[in-house]
Image: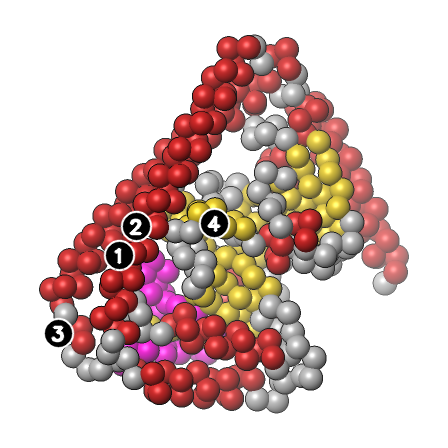
Amino acid sequence: MAAKSSHYFAQGNTARGAHFLYGSAFDGLNKIFVLTGPQGTGKSTVIQSLADSLLDKGLHVQHFHSPLRSDELDGIILTELKVGIVDGRVCTGISDSGAGEIVYIDFKGALNNSHLRPEHIITIEDLKGKLESAYSKTYETFATALQIHDEWEKYYIENMDFSKADQIAQDLIEEVYAGHESDTPATPRHLFFGAATPRGAYDFIQSLTAELERRIFIKGRAGSGKSTLLKKLASAAEQNGIEVQVFHCGFDPNSLDMLIFPKLGTAIFDSTAPHEYFPDRDGDEILDMYERAIAPGTDEAYAAEIAGIKARYSAKMKEATSHLAEAEAIDSQIKAYYVAATDFSVVEKLHLQLESELNELIGSIQFSK
């Protein structure tokens, strides 16, 4: 039985700054409801409530989680309806997503401005400055960590047999895609399966791959060609008209960490820290890029140098996570002011308005069947 829900991120706090994939994730929908207004005005609560009620109706719901609070939702897609609902504060790229219709719903109207005294507004503006500073420190520290990671990769890149790595990619392309090619190029869908959060790395790999028949776990080291392999497979899939979901690295979005081929029932993903998993069922297999493409003894030859780099990298990642935790704490303070000033009876009216529109769409689909 197919899962009724799937879980993703479409925003990441990365070494290259705030990175958004909503434009691709929401591409091709018939309608998108964009909920505008500051944090604390009930948007995430409404999105979660709608997701729950739609799941109860037996519809498939795609959940898009917040990288700041992974238990909260920034958006959903109702798969059968081809309708999206998203927080306007995070949906960069939506206007270019090719949606048939974008409807803005203003949650700022639920604010009772008489509850926001002048001193509150001054405090909020001060907190917004501190929040921006905390995010800047997060991105700067992640960027430093990425530079250290590049040092780490260098030892393995210099000891890689590129012809072997190329052959691994070609063999996989021929094996996985054989008999599924189409003359019409496919448009990949770009997503994150995980994110850097204030509590460290978090991912949805296990749930996203739970229903797939085949999972290929790529093992290796930093710089052993895992992301390059995935990029070659993604490019070949696009050229050969094979549907593919392309999952970017939540630390460095220029790198890829996973591909899912929905119609082929197959996933291939980087299964190393911080998202390290091991085969545990039929259809699981390991592809070890270190064993197959890196000169034997590389680990041992550079053990001391790599240990030092790894320690510096871990320290920077821990520091960046602490800055992200600071951002969450500041955001919570801002949110508290808006929560206290929000008239939730107005929020409930907006909720019921959205629910009514969705029920009409559900009814029209059921009637057409």
Neighbourhood count class around disc 1 (C-alpha, 10 Å): few under 14, some 14–19, many 20 upward: some
Residue where numbered disc 2 is placed: 144
Q: Residues within 10 Å of mark 4 (few under 14, many from 20)?
A: many
> Which amino acid lies under the numbered mark 3 shown in the image of this protein?
Ala
What amino acid is at disc 2? Thr
Q: Residue at x 50, y 15 (%)?
A: 122
Asked if the residue under mark 2 is in contact with the one under mark 1, i.e. CB atoms within 8 Å, the reply is: yes
x, y percent for residue 264: 58, 78
**Which mark is nearer the camera, 2 or 3?**
2
Q: Which residue is mark 1?
A: 148
Q: Secondary structure at mark 3?
A: helix
Instruction: Give the percent coordinates (x, y) of residue 135.
Output: 41, 38
Task: Out of 232 and 114, give the one closest to the viewer.
Answer: 232
Q: Secondary structure at mark 4?
A: strand
Between marks 4 and 1, how big is the CA–CA gap? Answer: 20 Å
Q: Is residue 214 in view?
A: no
Amino acid under label 1?
A: Ile
Is tag 2's residue or tag 4's residue first in the polypeptide sequence?
A: 4
Compared to 11, does 352 lie above or below? above
Determine which residue is flagged by label 4.
Answer: 12
The residue nearer to you, when weighing 212 against 97, is 97
Of labels 3 and 4, earlier in sequence is 4
Mark 3 highlights which residue?
301
Residue type of the residue flagged with mark 4 = Gly
The image quadrant that residue 261 belongs to is bottom right
* Residue 165 x, y percent position in the rendering: 36, 83
Q: Residue at x 83, y 57 (%)?
A: 365
Instruction: Say which element carries label 2.
Output: helix
